Image: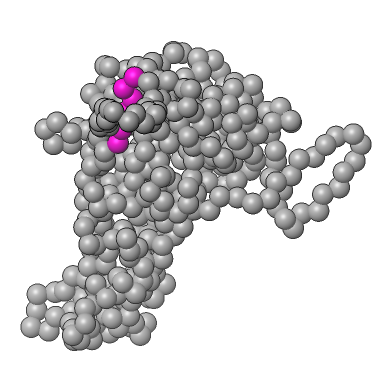
Amino acid sequence: MPILGPKALMDIAVPTGVDAGEVLRIEMESGLSGPEVIALAATVIGEANQYIMERMGGLLTLTERGHARYRQGVGSAHVTPVSSEFAEPDGVRADQIGHMLPRLDYKDATAWSNKYLRRAPREDVVDDLLEIKEGWTNRCIIDLLTRALSDAEKRIGQAGYDVPWVIGDSGQNVPYIPPQRGLHVFDETVTHFLRTNAAISASNAATALETAAKKLAWQGHTGRKLALVSESNLAVYEGMNAKKFVRVIPGDVKLVQGGSDVLLVSEGTLEGVPGELFGLYLSSYGVVELRYHERIPANYFWMTKSYGVNHRQNGLAIRTEPGVGFGMKVDPQISRSIVPALEFVLFPATHGVGVNDRTNGVAAQIASGGADYESPTVT
C-alpha cells in the first residue's frame, strides 16, 4: 500500500493537464508563486507521512479491510490423526471470531488569505506548514498509543466493535480466548492487561516486564520484543538488577573496564519503532528493547513484538481508504473570482488505528490503588 510522499501529493494537488500557474495565480513579495507554495506544502506533508511510517511502521500494518478474522480457542489443540485404511478422518473447521477496524476523517487548514500569501515571507509560510506537519505527527502517535494502552471496546455500527488485546472475560462484548499453543491452554481468565497493585519500583517493573514477555512468548511471539515505557519512570528501569538490565552504549563511545564489575553492552536495534532506546531487559522469554516516550503516561508500559515495517503480523493496524494509501493530503483552495488565485490549503486525511493481532500486545500499569487495569489518557 503506498505512502503519500511529496511527489504523490504534488500529483494529487496539481494533476496532469492542469496549468498550476494559471489556477493558483499568485505572486508573493518574497518571490514565491502559487505552484511553489503547493510544492512546499507537498514536500513538508509528504515528508511527515514518510517519517510516520519510518518511526511507527514497525508496530503496525496498513490495510484497507474494515474488519479482521482469526481463530479462537475451543478445547485442546488439534493434532493430525494417524491414517486408517478403512475410515476417513473427521472433518475439521476452525472456530472463528473477528472485530471491526475503525476509520475516521481528519482535516487541518492554514489560516491564509490571498492578501496574506501575497505579502508573507517565505519563512512564515514554511512555519505554518511545519505547524500542520507537527499536528499530523502528533495525531498519529496519540491514536497509536491510545489504542495500545486502552482496554476499551468501541462500538462501530450496530453490532461491531473495535477491540483491545486479549481479554477472555465473558463480560466483554467480544471476549477472546486464544487457541492452545504447545502445552499452553487458555481460558476466560486470560488477559493481556496487567496491573501491579503497588507503587512502581525497580523490582515491580522487572516483574511486570517478565510477565509481559512471557504472555507474548506463550502466544508464539518469540525473539526480541519492544517495551515502550514512560519517560517519567526512566530512573526506575535504570535501577533494575544489573544482571537483567543492559545499558545501550552508542557505537562511537569507547568502553573502559575497571575493577571487578562487568559492563554489558548491546549493539543492533529494531527499525521503524518510536521512542528513545536506553536499554535492554534480559527476560527469560527473550530480549526486550526498552524505549521511553514522553507521551506514555507515568507508571504504564506497552510491550509488543515487531516483525518489521508494515508487516502483517504486527500488533496494530492502520485502516486506510481503498486505493488511496496512507497519509495526509494537500488540497489547495482557490478563490471564486474571474482571476482565480490560491487562498489557503486544506489538509484532509482518513485513517483509523485498531488492533491487528490481539495476541501481539501487552499493556501494564504499576500503581497502588486497585487490582484492575485502568486505561490512561494519552495526550
User: Measuring 26% from the left and 67% from the top, which residue is drawn there?
Assistant: 330
For the magenta stretch, what is the residue range? 70-75
Q: Measured along the vertical axis of the image, is residue 48 above or below residue 195?
A: below
Query: Within the image, what quadrant is residue 378 found in?
Result: top left
Q: Position of residue 192 (x, y in %)?
A: 42, 26
User: Measuring 68% from the left and 50% from the top, which residue is drawn there?
Assistant: 267
Q: Measured along the vertical axis of the image, is residue 291 above or below residue 309?
A: above
Q: Position of residue 111 (x, y in %)?
A: 26, 63
| Screen quadrant of the N terminus | bottom left
Q: Residue furthest front?
A: 86
- Seen from the viewer's position, the closer of residues 101 and 375 is 101
Please indicate whether residue 265 sits to the left or right of residue 321 in the image: right
Q: Position of residue 353 (x, y in %)?
A: 31, 44
Task: State whether residue 141 appears in this view.
Answer: no
User: Measuring 49% from the left and 40% from the top, which residue is drawn there?
Assistant: 305
Q: Position of residue 5 (x, y in %)?
A: 36, 68
Please indicate whether residue 338 sits to the left or right of residue 118 in the image: left
- Seen from the viewer's position, the closer of residues 313 and 159 is 313
Q: Measured along the vertical axis of the image, is residue 366 above or below residue 351?
A: above
Task: State whether residue 322 appears in this view.
Answer: yes
